[in-house]
Image (cartoon, coloured by chain):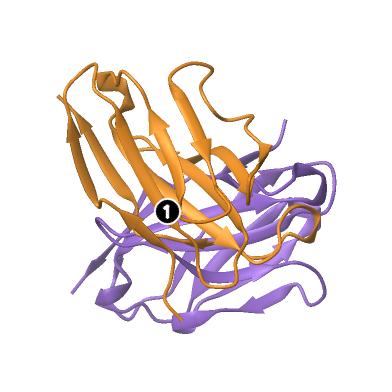
Amino acid sequence: NAGVMQNPRHLVRRRGQEARLRCSPMKGHSHVYWYRQLPEEGLKFMVYLQKENIIDESGMPKERFSAEFPKEGPSILRIQQVVRGDSAAYFCASSPVGGAHQETQYFGPGTRLLVL
Amino acid sequence: AQSVTQPDIHITVSEGASLELRCNYSYGATPYLFWYVQSPGQGLQLLLKYFSGDTLVQGIKGFEAEFKRSQSSFNLRKPSVHWSDAAEYFCAVGARNQGGKLIFGQGTELSVKP
């Protein structure tokens, strides 16, 4: 059973460009979470999604950031008009059941975004 | 507000010595507690978790942690550290009314001296 997959592993963008980060959850998992890790910090929750639904986006910046988890295909975290402060590691996690059942979240290897 | 504190940013221990990494949380209800380990440039690997029941939980790689409600703590321990344990360790908290999100501590970087 393959783990959580993220691609690309490394992404370099210039200021003002768009960044698209992809996450394929573990087989059988229908809940996806995105976290951001700034340098020298812990992970900060961004958004929690089920297929075709955003459950909790309380950690998402109000502008330029969006996330989706379509019926088919991976979850996408999209950052428009990137700025240097967006440079960070972005981690995706998945669980078979989410919310109140608090299943364990399994993390992918992350995407390291560098904005020049 | 919910929070997780890992008081030690960096710890160095000698190989073979015992280890304890501290984690304190602030939360009104009984939390779900996790320890993850992150090697440089890698993702997070789950070491162990506490949901309910026995307050001493065993994890992978010889790690264990004890939930102490009275102290709001969930410290990670290992009796004998190996050089391969050098990594960053994160404590995290979740809860039923928190939806799916985990709140992470800032991490403790562990160095192991030969």
Residue B86: image location, x then y, percent: 29, 66
Classed neighbour count for the residue bearing mark 1: other residues with Cα under 10 Å, few (<14), some (14–19), many (≥20): many
Q: In the figure, B82 relative to A8: above or below?
A: below
Horizontal side of B86 relative to A29 (left or right) equals: left
Horizontal side of A113 relative to B3 (left or right) equals: left
Residue A13: image location, x then y, percent: 18, 29
Viewer-nearest residue: A115 or A37? A115
Number of numbered labels in the structure image? 1
Q: Quadrant of the C terminus of chain B?
A: bottom left
Viewer-nearest residue: A46 or B63? A46
Image-quadrant location for residue A89: top left
Image-quadrant location for residue A74: bottom left
Residue designated by label 1 = A23
| Residue A83 visible in the picture | yes
Q: Name the kind of residue labelled 1 in the image.
A: Cys
Of all chains in the rendering, the one displayed in orange is: A
Residue A12: image location, x then y, percent: 17, 35
Q: In the figure, A88 relative to B37: above or below?
A: above
**Residue reaching furthest front?**
A72
Viewer-nearest residue: B93 or A14? A14
- Give me the residue at 53% from left, 72% from top: A27
Residue B64: image location, x then y, percent: 57, 76
Q: Chain of mark 1?
A: A
Chain B colour as displayed: purple
Horizontal side of B83 relative to B8 (left or right) equals: left
Viewer-nearest residue: B34 or A25? A25
- Give me the residue at 37% from left, 28% from top: A79
